[in-house]
Image (spheres, coloured by chain):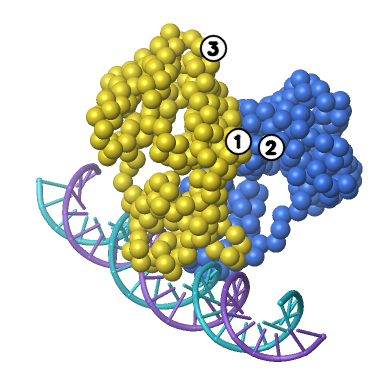
Chain colours: A blue, B yellow, C purple, D cyan
Amino acid sequence: MNDTAAVPDLAGTQPDEPKTLAEAAYRRLRRDIIEGIHPPGEKLRVEHLKDHYAVGAGTLREALQLLVTDALVVAQGQRGFRVAPISLDDFEDITRTRVLLETAALQQSIECGDDAWEANVVAAFHMLSRAESKLEEGNEGNREEWELRNQAFHEVLISASPSRWCRHFQNILYLQSERYRRLSLFRQPISRDVHAEHQAIVDAVLARDVQEATRILTEHILRTLEAVRQIPPDVLS
Amino acid sequence: MNDTAAVPDLAGTQPDEPKTLAEAAYRRLRRDIIEGIHPPGEKLRVEHLKDHYAVGAGTLREALQLLVTDALVVAQGQRGFRVAPISLDDFEDITRTRVLLETAALQQSIECGDDAWEANVVAAFHMLSRAESKLEEGNEGNREEWELRNQAFHEVLISASPSRWCRHFQNILYLQSERYRRLSLFRQPISRDVHAEHQAIVDAVLARDVQEATRILTEHILRTLEAVRQIPPDVLS
DNA sequence: TCAATACATTTTCTCGAGATTTTAATTTAG
DNA sequence: CTAAATTAAAATCTCGAGAAAATGTATTGA
Protein backbone atom coordinates (compact mmCIF):
# COMPACT_ATOMS: atom_id res chain seq x y z
CA MET A 1 0.00 0.00 0.00
CA ASN A 2 2.82 2.37 0.92
CA ASP A 3 5.16 0.67 -1.52
CA THR A 4 4.91 3.40 -4.11
CA ALA A 5 4.86 6.38 -1.78
CA ALA A 6 8.29 7.91 -1.49
CA VAL A 7 7.07 10.42 1.06
CA PRO A 8 5.14 9.03 4.02
CA ASP A 9 1.60 10.27 4.15
CA LEU A 10 0.36 12.09 7.20
CA ALA A 11 0.64 9.77 10.14
CA GLY A 12 -2.81 8.39 10.65
CA THR A 13 -5.17 8.93 7.77
CA GLN A 14 -7.88 11.18 9.10
CA PRO A 15 -11.35 9.66 8.84
CA ASP A 16 -12.94 10.99 5.65
CA GLU A 17 -15.91 13.25 6.03
CA PRO A 18 -19.24 11.55 6.51
CA LYS A 19 -21.21 11.95 3.30
CA THR A 20 -24.59 10.99 4.69
CA LEU A 21 -26.67 12.20 7.60
CA ALA A 22 -26.95 8.70 8.96
CA GLU A 23 -23.20 8.35 9.14
CA ALA A 24 -22.84 11.76 10.74
CA ALA A 25 -25.33 10.79 13.42
CA TYR A 26 -23.48 7.50 13.80
CA ARG A 27 -20.21 9.30 14.45
CA ARG A 28 -21.74 11.59 17.06
CA LEU A 29 -23.58 8.79 18.78
CA ARG A 30 -20.46 6.66 18.83
CA ARG A 31 -18.45 9.40 20.48
CA ASP A 32 -21.18 10.01 23.03
CA ILE A 33 -21.32 6.33 23.91
CA ILE A 34 -17.56 5.99 24.22
CA GLU A 35 -17.37 9.16 26.30
CA GLY A 36 -20.01 7.78 28.62
CA ILE A 37 -22.68 10.37 27.90
CA HIS A 38 -24.91 7.42 27.16
CA PRO A 39 -23.90 5.04 29.96
CA PRO A 40 -23.75 1.26 29.46
CA GLY A 41 -27.15 -0.41 29.53
CA GLU A 42 -29.08 2.77 28.81
CA LYS A 43 -32.09 2.41 26.60
CA LEU A 44 -31.79 4.32 23.36
CA ARG A 45 -35.26 5.53 22.42
CA VAL A 46 -35.47 6.64 18.83
CA GLU A 47 -38.17 9.22 19.50
CA HIS A 48 -36.12 10.95 22.16
CA LEU A 49 -32.86 10.91 20.28
CA LYS A 50 -34.04 11.97 16.84
CA ASP A 51 -34.63 15.58 17.88
CA HIS A 52 -31.40 15.77 19.88
CA TYR A 53 -29.38 14.68 16.88
CA ALA A 54 -31.65 16.58 14.49
CA VAL A 55 -32.41 13.73 12.09
CA GLY A 56 -35.45 11.70 11.11
CA ALA A 57 -36.51 8.52 12.86
CA GLY A 58 -35.46 6.21 10.05
CA THR A 59 -32.12 7.94 9.76
CA LEU A 60 -31.33 7.57 13.43
CA ARG A 61 -32.36 3.97 13.15
CA GLU A 62 -29.68 3.40 10.54
CA ALA A 63 -27.11 5.06 12.75
CA LEU A 64 -28.03 2.65 15.53
CA GLN A 65 -27.66 -0.30 13.18
CA LEU A 66 -24.17 0.89 12.30
CA LEU A 67 -23.34 0.95 16.00
CA VAL A 68 -24.50 -2.64 16.29
CA THR A 69 -21.71 -3.46 13.85
CA ASP A 70 -19.22 -2.09 16.34
CA ALA A 71 -20.96 -3.94 19.16
CA LEU A 72 -21.38 -0.66 21.01
CA VAL A 73 -25.15 -1.06 20.79
CA VAL A 74 -27.23 -4.20 21.09
CA ALA A 75 -30.56 -4.63 19.30
CA GLN A 76 -33.11 -6.93 20.91
CA GLY A 77 -35.83 -8.35 18.74
CA GLN A 78 -38.81 -6.09 18.99
CA ARG A 79 -37.61 -4.28 22.09
CA GLY A 80 -35.49 -1.53 20.64
CA PHE A 81 -31.85 -0.62 21.15
CA ARG A 82 -29.66 -0.42 24.19
CA VAL A 83 -26.10 0.67 24.92
CA ALA A 84 -23.94 -2.43 25.19
CA PRO A 85 -23.29 -3.33 28.83
CA ILE A 86 -19.78 -3.49 30.21
CA SER A 87 -18.12 -5.82 32.68
CA LEU A 88 -14.67 -6.72 33.84
CA ASP A 89 -14.98 -10.15 32.24
CA ASP A 90 -15.85 -8.52 28.95
CA PHE A 91 -12.85 -6.23 29.07
CA GLU A 92 -10.59 -9.12 29.91
CA ASP A 93 -11.92 -10.92 26.87
CA ILE A 94 -11.49 -7.84 24.70
CA THR A 95 -7.92 -7.38 25.89
CA ARG A 96 -6.82 -10.97 25.37
CA THR A 97 -8.41 -11.18 21.93
CA ARG A 98 -6.80 -7.90 21.05
CA VAL A 99 -3.41 -9.19 22.09
CA LEU A 100 -3.91 -12.25 19.94
CA LEU A 101 -4.83 -10.26 16.84
CA GLU A 102 -2.55 -7.29 17.30
CA THR A 103 0.59 -9.30 17.94
CA ALA A 104 -0.11 -11.48 14.92
CA ALA A 105 -0.65 -8.39 12.80
CA LEU A 106 2.46 -6.71 14.18
CA GLN A 107 4.55 -9.74 13.33
CA GLN A 108 3.30 -9.69 9.75
CA SER A 109 3.81 -5.96 9.64
CA ILE A 110 7.45 -6.23 10.70
CA GLU A 111 8.01 -8.97 8.15
CA CYS A 112 6.30 -7.16 5.28
CA GLY A 113 6.80 -3.48 6.09
CA ASP A 114 9.07 -1.39 3.92
CA ASP A 115 10.95 1.84 4.57
CA ALA A 116 7.87 3.98 4.09
CA TRP A 117 6.10 1.98 6.78
CA GLU A 118 9.00 2.55 9.17
CA ALA A 119 8.78 6.24 8.43
CA ASN A 120 5.06 6.21 9.17
CA VAL A 121 5.70 4.51 12.50
CA VAL A 122 8.27 7.10 13.47
CA ALA A 123 5.98 9.90 12.35
CA ALA A 124 2.99 8.56 14.28
CA PHE A 125 5.15 8.17 17.37
CA HIS A 126 6.29 11.75 17.03
CA MET A 127 2.72 13.00 16.75
CA LEU A 128 1.84 11.02 19.85
CA SER A 129 4.81 12.36 21.79
CA ARG A 130 3.84 15.92 20.98
CA ALA A 131 0.32 15.27 22.19
CA GLU A 132 1.76 13.93 25.43
CA SER A 133 3.77 17.10 25.91
CA LYS A 134 0.67 19.23 25.51
CA LEU A 135 -1.14 16.93 27.88
CA GLU A 136 1.30 17.66 30.68
CA GLU A 137 0.51 21.33 30.39
CA GLY A 138 -2.73 20.49 32.11
CA ASN A 139 -4.95 21.28 29.18
CA GLU A 140 -7.70 18.72 29.42
CA GLY A 141 -9.04 19.58 25.98
CA ASN A 142 -6.04 17.90 24.42
CA ARG A 143 -6.91 14.50 25.76
CA GLU A 144 -9.19 13.97 22.79
CA GLU A 145 -6.25 14.68 20.54
CA TRP A 146 -4.08 12.23 22.44
CA GLU A 147 -6.70 9.50 22.08
CA LEU A 148 -6.86 10.00 18.33
CA ARG A 149 -3.10 9.91 17.95
CA ASN A 150 -2.76 6.89 20.21
CA GLN A 151 -5.25 5.06 18.04
CA ALA A 152 -3.41 6.25 14.94
CA PHE A 153 -0.11 4.96 16.35
CA HIS A 154 -1.49 1.49 17.01
CA GLU A 155 -3.10 1.51 13.60
CA VAL A 156 0.10 2.44 11.80
CA LEU A 157 2.02 -0.25 13.67
CA ILE A 158 -0.01 -2.97 11.98
CA SER A 159 -0.71 -1.06 8.78
CA ALA A 160 1.88 -3.05 6.84
CA SER A 161 0.18 -6.33 7.65
CA PRO A 162 -1.49 -7.75 4.56
CA SER A 163 -4.34 -9.10 6.68
CA ARG A 164 -7.26 -6.75 6.26
CA TRP A 165 -9.35 -8.93 8.57
CA CYS A 166 -6.92 -8.68 11.45
CA ARG A 167 -6.90 -4.93 11.06
CA HIS A 168 -10.68 -4.81 10.84
CA PHE A 169 -11.19 -6.78 14.03
CA GLN A 170 -8.47 -4.82 15.75
CA ASN A 171 -10.30 -1.60 14.97
CA ILE A 172 -13.48 -2.92 16.54
CA LEU A 173 -11.69 -4.10 19.65
CA TYR A 174 -9.82 -0.83 19.98
CA LEU A 175 -13.09 1.10 20.00
CA GLN A 176 -14.41 -1.23 22.65
CA SER A 177 -11.39 -0.88 24.88
CA GLU A 178 -11.46 2.87 24.46
CA ARG A 179 -14.72 2.95 26.38
CA TYR A 180 -13.14 1.16 29.31
CA ARG A 181 -9.96 3.17 29.18
CA ARG A 182 -11.91 6.40 29.57
CA LEU A 183 -13.19 5.12 32.86
CA SER A 184 -9.70 4.40 34.16
CA LEU A 185 -8.39 7.76 32.96
CA PHE A 186 -10.61 9.56 35.41
CA ARG A 187 -8.59 8.07 38.22
CA GLN A 188 -5.08 7.90 36.87
CA PRO A 189 -3.87 10.11 34.05
CA ILE A 190 -1.58 8.91 31.30
CA SER A 191 1.72 8.04 32.92
CA ARG A 192 5.19 8.35 31.51
CA ASP A 193 5.47 4.57 31.45
CA VAL A 194 3.14 4.58 28.50
CA HIS A 195 5.50 6.84 26.61
CA ALA A 196 8.46 4.61 27.45
CA GLU A 197 6.58 1.56 26.25
CA HIS A 198 5.70 3.22 22.99
CA GLN A 199 9.34 4.17 22.57
CA ALA A 200 10.42 0.59 23.22
CA ILE A 201 7.99 -0.70 20.64
CA VAL A 202 9.32 1.71 18.04
CA ASP A 203 12.89 0.67 18.81
CA ALA A 204 12.06 -3.01 18.47
CA VAL A 205 10.17 -2.37 15.26
CA LEU A 206 13.06 -0.50 13.69
CA ALA A 207 15.38 -3.31 14.77
CA ARG A 208 12.95 -5.75 13.11
CA ASP A 209 12.91 -7.76 16.31
CA VAL A 210 9.59 -9.61 16.18
CA GLN A 211 10.02 -11.38 19.51
CA GLU A 212 10.82 -8.23 21.42
CA ALA A 213 8.21 -6.08 19.69
CA THR A 214 5.34 -8.49 20.29
CA ARG A 215 6.46 -9.05 23.86
CA ILE A 216 6.40 -5.35 24.69
CA LEU A 217 3.16 -4.80 22.83
CA THR A 218 1.54 -7.61 24.80
CA GLU A 219 2.67 -6.15 28.09
CA HIS A 220 1.57 -2.73 26.94
CA ILE A 221 -1.96 -3.87 26.18
CA LEU A 222 -2.22 -5.99 29.31
CA ARG A 223 -1.21 -2.99 31.41
CA THR A 224 -4.43 -1.22 30.51
CA LEU A 225 -6.25 -4.29 31.78
CA GLU A 226 -4.57 -3.82 35.14
CA ALA A 227 -5.55 -0.16 35.13
CA VAL A 228 -9.18 -1.03 34.57
CA ARG A 229 -8.99 -3.63 37.34
CA GLN A 230 -8.23 -0.77 39.72
CA ILE A 231 -11.61 0.79 39.00
CA PRO A 232 -14.05 0.20 41.86
CA PRO A 233 -16.75 -2.27 40.81
CA ASP A 234 -19.59 0.18 41.30
CA VAL A 235 -18.29 2.43 38.53
CA LEU A 236 -18.78 -0.45 36.10
CA SER A 237 -22.51 -0.01 36.76
CA MET B 1 -22.33 -21.92 30.20
CA ASN B 2 -22.98 -25.65 30.03
CA ASP B 3 -21.83 -26.12 33.58
CA THR B 4 -25.29 -26.54 34.97
CA ALA B 5 -26.79 -28.57 32.12
CA ALA B 6 -26.77 -32.25 32.99
CA VAL B 7 -28.26 -33.16 29.65
CA PRO B 8 -26.57 -31.74 26.58
CA ASP B 9 -28.83 -29.51 24.56
CA LEU B 10 -29.47 -30.30 20.94
CA ALA B 11 -26.21 -30.13 19.08
CA GLY B 12 -26.20 -26.75 17.42
CA THR B 13 -28.72 -24.33 18.76
CA GLN B 14 -31.05 -23.59 15.89
CA PRO B 15 -31.16 -19.92 14.98
CA ASP B 16 -34.14 -18.39 16.76
CA GLU B 17 -36.97 -17.13 14.63
CA PRO B 18 -36.56 -13.66 13.21
CA LYS B 19 -39.00 -11.40 15.04
CA THR B 20 -38.86 -8.50 12.63
CA LEU B 21 -39.36 -8.15 8.89
CA ALA B 22 -35.99 -6.51 8.52
CA GLU B 23 -34.26 -9.48 10.06
CA ALA B 24 -36.23 -11.91 7.93
CA ALA B 25 -35.19 -10.06 4.80
CA TYR B 26 -31.64 -10.03 6.15
CA ARG B 27 -31.64 -13.81 6.49
CA ARG B 28 -32.97 -14.38 3.01
CA LEU B 29 -30.59 -11.90 1.46
CA ARG B 30 -27.67 -13.43 3.30
CA ARG B 31 -28.49 -16.89 2.04
CA ASP B 32 -28.89 -15.61 -1.50
CA ILE B 33 -25.53 -13.89 -1.38
CA ILE B 34 -23.74 -16.90 0.07
CA GLU B 35 -25.39 -19.17 -2.47
CA GLY B 36 -24.20 -16.91 -5.23
CA ILE B 37 -27.63 -15.80 -6.45
CA HIS B 38 -26.33 -12.30 -5.99
CA PRO B 39 -22.80 -12.66 -7.36
CA PRO B 40 -19.84 -10.77 -5.88
CA GLY B 41 -19.64 -7.15 -6.95
CA GLU B 42 -23.30 -6.95 -8.00
CA LYS B 43 -25.04 -3.70 -7.29
CA LEU B 44 -27.92 -4.09 -4.86
CA ARG B 45 -30.59 -1.59 -5.88
CA VAL B 46 -33.12 -1.01 -3.15
CA GLU B 47 -35.93 -0.22 -5.57
CA HIS B 48 -35.49 -3.50 -7.43
CA LEU B 49 -35.07 -5.68 -4.37
CA LYS B 50 -37.86 -4.33 -2.19
CA ASP B 51 -40.60 -5.91 -4.31
CA HIS B 52 -38.73 -9.20 -4.70
CA TYR B 53 -38.39 -9.56 -0.94
CA ALA B 54 -41.81 -8.00 -0.34
CA VAL B 55 -40.76 -5.32 2.14
CA GLY B 56 -40.61 -1.53 2.19
CA ALA B 57 -37.62 0.47 1.07
CA GLY B 58 -36.53 1.49 4.55
CA THR B 59 -36.87 -2.07 5.79
CA LEU B 60 -34.70 -3.50 3.05
CA ARG B 61 -32.23 -0.76 3.81
CA GLU B 62 -31.91 -2.03 7.36
CA ALA B 63 -31.39 -5.55 6.12
CA LEU B 64 -28.55 -4.31 3.95
CA GLN B 65 -26.99 -2.53 6.91
CA LEU B 66 -27.07 -5.77 8.85
CA LEU B 67 -25.24 -7.46 6.01
CA VAL B 68 -22.57 -4.78 6.18
CA THR B 69 -21.93 -6.04 9.71
CA ASP B 70 -21.09 -9.45 8.28
CA ALA B 71 -18.97 -7.80 5.58
CA LEU B 72 -21.03 -9.57 2.93
CA VAL B 73 -22.18 -6.20 1.61
CA VAL B 74 -20.23 -2.98 1.29
CA ALA B 75 -21.86 0.44 1.52
CA GLN B 76 -20.25 3.31 -0.35
CA GLY B 77 -21.00 6.82 0.74
CA GLN B 78 -23.84 8.09 -1.35
CA ARG B 79 -23.56 5.40 -3.98
CA GLY B 80 -25.63 2.62 -2.55
CA PHE B 81 -24.83 -0.97 -1.68
CA ARG B 82 -22.87 -3.67 -3.42
CA VAL B 83 -22.16 -7.35 -2.80
CA ALA B 84 -18.68 -7.66 -1.30
CA PRO B 85 -16.15 -8.70 -3.93
CA ILE B 86 -14.14 -11.89 -3.58
CA SER B 87 -10.56 -12.73 -4.37
CA LEU B 88 -8.04 -15.44 -3.66
CA ASP B 89 -6.03 -13.06 -1.51
CA ASP B 90 -9.10 -12.31 0.53
CA PHE B 91 -9.86 -15.96 1.12
CA GLU B 92 -6.27 -16.60 2.13
CA ASP B 93 -6.61 -13.81 4.65
CA ILE B 94 -9.92 -15.15 5.90
CA THR B 95 -8.49 -18.62 6.29
CA ARG B 96 -5.35 -17.60 8.16
CA THR B 97 -7.24 -15.29 10.49
CA ARG B 98 -9.74 -18.02 11.09
CA VAL B 99 -6.98 -20.46 11.99
CA LEU B 100 -5.59 -17.92 14.43
CA LEU B 101 -8.89 -17.36 16.19
CA GLU B 102 -10.31 -20.85 16.00
CA THR B 103 -7.22 -22.61 17.33
CA ALA B 104 -7.01 -20.15 20.21
CA ALA B 105 -10.67 -20.71 21.00
CA LEU B 106 -10.31 -24.48 20.71
CA GLN B 107 -7.43 -24.44 23.14
CA GLN B 108 -9.48 -22.51 25.67
CA SER B 109 -12.41 -24.80 25.02
CA ILE B 110 -10.39 -27.92 25.75
CA GLU B 111 -9.04 -26.34 28.91
CA CYS B 112 -12.41 -25.11 30.17
CA GLY B 113 -14.90 -27.58 28.73
CA ASP B 114 -16.74 -29.93 31.03
CA ASP B 115 -18.43 -33.28 30.43
CA ALA B 116 -21.52 -31.69 28.95
CA TRP B 117 -19.35 -29.95 26.39
CA GLU B 118 -17.71 -33.23 25.44
CA ALA B 119 -21.15 -34.71 25.01
CA ASN B 120 -22.15 -31.83 22.76
CA VAL B 121 -19.08 -32.36 20.61
CA VAL B 122 -19.85 -36.04 20.22
CA ALA B 123 -23.47 -35.27 19.45
CA ALA B 124 -22.63 -32.64 16.84
CA PHE B 125 -20.17 -35.02 15.23
CA HIS B 126 -22.84 -37.68 15.07
CA MET B 127 -25.29 -35.29 13.43
CA LEU B 128 -22.64 -34.37 10.89
CA SER B 129 -21.80 -38.00 10.16
CA ARG B 130 -25.43 -38.79 9.49
CA ALA B 131 -25.67 -35.88 7.10
CA GLU B 132 -22.62 -37.23 5.27
CA SER B 133 -24.28 -40.61 4.90
CA LYS B 134 -27.32 -39.03 3.33
CA LEU B 135 -25.07 -36.97 1.12
CA GLU B 136 -23.54 -40.09 -0.43
CA GLU B 137 -26.96 -41.21 -1.52
CA GLY B 138 -26.71 -38.56 -4.16
CA ASN B 139 -29.46 -36.38 -2.81
CA GLU B 140 -28.29 -32.89 -3.53
CA GLY B 141 -30.99 -31.35 -1.39
CA ASN B 142 -29.20 -32.55 1.72
CA ARG B 143 -26.14 -30.45 1.08
CA GLU B 144 -27.85 -27.54 2.78
CA GLU B 145 -28.31 -29.75 5.82
CA TRP B 146 -24.69 -30.79 5.77
CA GLU B 147 -23.56 -27.17 5.65
CA LEU B 148 -25.66 -26.31 8.69
CA ARG B 149 -24.37 -29.27 10.67
CA ASN B 150 -20.79 -28.60 9.67
CA GLN B 151 -21.15 -25.07 10.94
CA ALA B 152 -22.78 -26.38 14.10
CA PHE B 153 -19.90 -28.80 14.65
CA HIS B 154 -17.28 -26.10 14.41
CA GLU B 155 -19.36 -23.88 16.64
CA VAL B 156 -19.73 -26.52 19.33
CA LEU B 157 -16.01 -27.23 19.27
CA ILE B 158 -15.26 -23.74 20.54
CA SER B 159 -18.47 -23.29 22.52
CA ALA B 160 -16.72 -23.93 25.84
CA SER B 161 -14.31 -21.08 25.24
CA PRO B 162 -15.09 -18.18 27.57
CA SER B 163 -14.10 -15.71 24.86
CA ARG B 164 -17.28 -14.35 23.34
CA TRP B 165 -15.25 -12.15 21.03
CA CYS B 166 -13.31 -15.02 19.53
CA ARG B 167 -16.55 -16.83 18.89
CA HIS B 168 -18.13 -13.72 17.42
CA PHE B 169 -15.31 -13.13 14.96
CA GLN B 170 -15.18 -16.80 14.13
CA ASN B 171 -18.84 -16.72 13.17
CA ILE B 172 -18.24 -13.85 10.78
CA LEU B 173 -15.26 -15.54 9.18
CA TYR B 174 -17.13 -18.81 8.84
CA LEU B 175 -19.90 -17.08 6.92
CA GLN B 176 -17.33 -15.51 4.67
CA SER B 177 -15.53 -18.76 3.95
CA GLU B 178 -18.84 -20.47 3.28
CA ARG B 179 -19.26 -18.31 0.21
CA TYR B 180 -15.93 -19.46 -1.17
CA ARG B 181 -16.48 -23.08 -0.22
CA ARG B 182 -19.69 -23.18 -2.24
CA LEU B 183 -17.66 -22.34 -5.30
CA SER B 184 -15.24 -25.20 -4.71
CA LEU B 185 -18.03 -27.67 -3.99
CA PHE B 186 -19.26 -27.38 -7.56
CA ARG B 187 -16.06 -29.02 -8.70
CA GLN B 188 -15.21 -31.50 -6.00
CA PRO B 189 -17.80 -32.88 -3.59
CA ILE B 190 -17.15 -33.45 0.08
CA SER B 191 -14.51 -36.15 0.32
CA ARG B 192 -14.11 -38.81 2.96
CA ASP B 193 -10.96 -37.13 4.16
CA VAL B 194 -13.11 -34.45 5.69
CA HIS B 195 -14.92 -37.05 7.76
CA ALA B 196 -11.65 -38.58 8.90
CA GLU B 197 -10.35 -35.17 9.91
CA HIS B 198 -13.45 -34.44 11.91
CA GLN B 199 -13.08 -37.82 13.59
CA ALA B 200 -9.46 -37.09 14.45
CA ILE B 201 -10.42 -33.74 15.96
CA VAL B 202 -13.04 -35.37 18.14
CA ASP B 203 -10.54 -37.99 19.31
CA ALA B 204 -7.97 -35.36 20.19
CA VAL B 205 -10.59 -33.29 21.99
CA LEU B 206 -11.75 -36.21 24.11
CA ALA B 207 -8.12 -36.98 24.91
CA ARG B 208 -7.74 -33.33 25.93
CA ASP B 209 -4.70 -33.10 23.67
CA VAL B 210 -4.46 -29.41 22.84
CA GLN B 211 -1.40 -29.72 20.62
CA GLU B 212 -2.87 -32.49 18.49
CA ALA B 213 -6.32 -30.96 18.28
CA THR B 214 -5.14 -27.55 17.16
CA ARG B 215 -2.72 -29.12 14.70
CA ILE B 216 -5.42 -31.14 12.99
CA LEU B 217 -7.87 -28.26 13.04
CA THR B 218 -5.30 -26.03 11.39
CA GLU B 219 -4.65 -28.57 8.65
CA HIS B 220 -8.37 -29.07 8.27
CA ILE B 221 -9.05 -25.39 7.69
CA LEU B 222 -6.04 -24.92 5.44
CA ARG B 223 -7.24 -27.81 3.27
CA THR B 224 -10.26 -25.81 2.21
CA LEU B 225 -7.84 -23.09 1.13
CA GLU B 226 -6.15 -25.59 -1.17
CA ALA B 227 -9.53 -26.62 -2.55
CA VAL B 228 -10.38 -23.04 -3.40
CA ARG B 229 -6.97 -22.59 -5.03
CA GLN B 230 -8.03 -25.27 -7.52
CA ILE B 231 -10.84 -23.08 -8.76
CA PRO B 232 -10.00 -21.51 -12.12
CA PRO B 233 -9.41 -17.78 -11.74
CA ASP B 234 -12.26 -16.79 -14.06
CA VAL B 235 -14.83 -18.26 -11.68
CA LEU B 236 -13.73 -15.78 -9.05
CA SER B 237 -15.20 -13.13 -11.35
C1' DT C 1 -52.72 -8.39 50.72
C1' DC C 2 -51.67 -10.69 46.55
C1' DA C 3 -52.41 -12.38 41.87
C1' DA C 4 -54.39 -12.13 37.46
C1' DT C 5 -56.77 -9.76 33.86
C1' DA C 6 -57.88 -5.79 31.02
C1' DC C 7 -56.86 -1.34 29.57
C1' DA C 8 -54.10 2.72 28.18
C1' DT C 9 -49.79 4.70 27.06
C1' DT C 10 -45.48 4.47 25.12
C1' DT C 11 -42.23 2.74 21.80
C1' DT C 12 -40.88 0.27 18.05
C1' DC C 13 -41.45 -1.08 13.43
C1' DT C 14 -43.06 -0.35 8.72
C1' DC C 15 -44.43 2.04 4.64
C1' DG C 16 -44.70 5.37 0.74
C1' DA C 17 -43.59 10.03 -1.12
C1' DG C 18 -40.44 14.02 -1.79
C1' DA C 19 -35.65 16.13 -2.04
C1' DT C 20 -30.71 15.51 -3.21
C1' DT C 21 -27.17 13.25 -5.45
C1' DT C 22 -25.17 10.23 -8.75
C1' DT C 23 -25.05 8.12 -13.28
C1' DA C 24 -25.84 7.89 -18.17
C1' DA C 25 -26.85 9.95 -22.55
C1' DT C 26 -26.91 13.65 -25.72
C1' DT C 27 -25.21 17.64 -27.53
C1' DT C 28 -21.78 20.90 -28.83
C1' DA C 29 -17.37 22.91 -29.45
C1' DG C 30 -12.50 22.28 -30.69
C1' DC D 1 -13.02 12.09 -33.89
C1' DT D 2 -12.19 13.38 -29.11
C1' DA D 3 -13.43 15.78 -25.06
C1' DA D 4 -15.90 18.83 -22.25
C1' DA D 5 -20.44 20.50 -20.95
C1' DT D 6 -25.45 20.31 -20.59
C1' DT D 7 -29.45 17.73 -19.89
C1' DA D 8 -32.32 13.75 -18.57
C1' DA D 9 -32.99 9.67 -15.94
C1' DA D 10 -32.33 6.67 -12.19
C1' DA D 11 -31.13 5.71 -7.65
C1' DT D 12 -30.20 6.94 -3.10
C1' DC D 13 -31.20 9.28 0.99
C1' DT D 14 -34.43 11.46 4.13
C1' DC D 15 -38.65 12.46 6.47
C1' DG D 16 -43.22 12.07 8.85
C1' DA D 17 -47.43 9.32 9.62
C1' DG D 18 -49.79 4.96 10.51
C1' DA D 19 -49.85 -0.13 12.27
C1' DA D 20 -48.06 -3.67 15.47
C1' DA D 21 -46.05 -4.75 19.70
C1' DA D 22 -44.46 -4.10 24.43
C1' DT D 23 -44.41 -1.82 28.86
C1' DG D 24 -46.77 0.09 32.75
C1' DT D 25 -51.08 1.07 35.29
C1' DA D 26 -55.44 0.38 37.11
C1' DT D 27 -59.15 -2.63 38.17
C1' DT D 28 -61.27 -6.80 39.79
C1' DG D 29 -61.58 -10.97 42.34
C1' DA D 30 -59.97 -14.30 45.80
Count residues near mark 2 (Cα–Cα under 10 Å), then give few for <14, some for 14-19, many for 20+: some
Q: Secondary structure at mark 3?
A: helix
What is the chain letter for disc 1?
A: B
Residue at (36% x, 52% y) in the render: B28
Give the alpha-carbon distance from disc 3 to disc 2, as whole Å: 27 Å
From the image, state whether disc 1 or disc 3 is nearer to you.
1
Mark 1 secondary-structure assignment: helix
Residue B93: assigned label: 1
Quadrant showing the N terminus of chain B: top left
Relative to A129, B168 lies left or right = left
Residue B62, given in percent of the width and then of the height, sits at: 46, 58
In three-dimensional space, the C-alpha distance between marks 1 and 2, rounded to whole angstroms, equals 8 Å
Question: Is A18 positioned to the left or the right of C14 in the image?
Answer: right
Report, in whole angstroms, how far the alpha carbon at label 1 lies from the one at label 3: 23 Å
Location of mark 2 (residue): A162
Q: Nearer the viewer, residue A31 or A19?
A: A19
Residue A141: tell me if it is visible: yes
Residue to which mark 3 is pinned: B211
Q: Where residue B79 appears, x then y in whole percent? A: 58, 65
The kind of residue tagged 1 is Asp
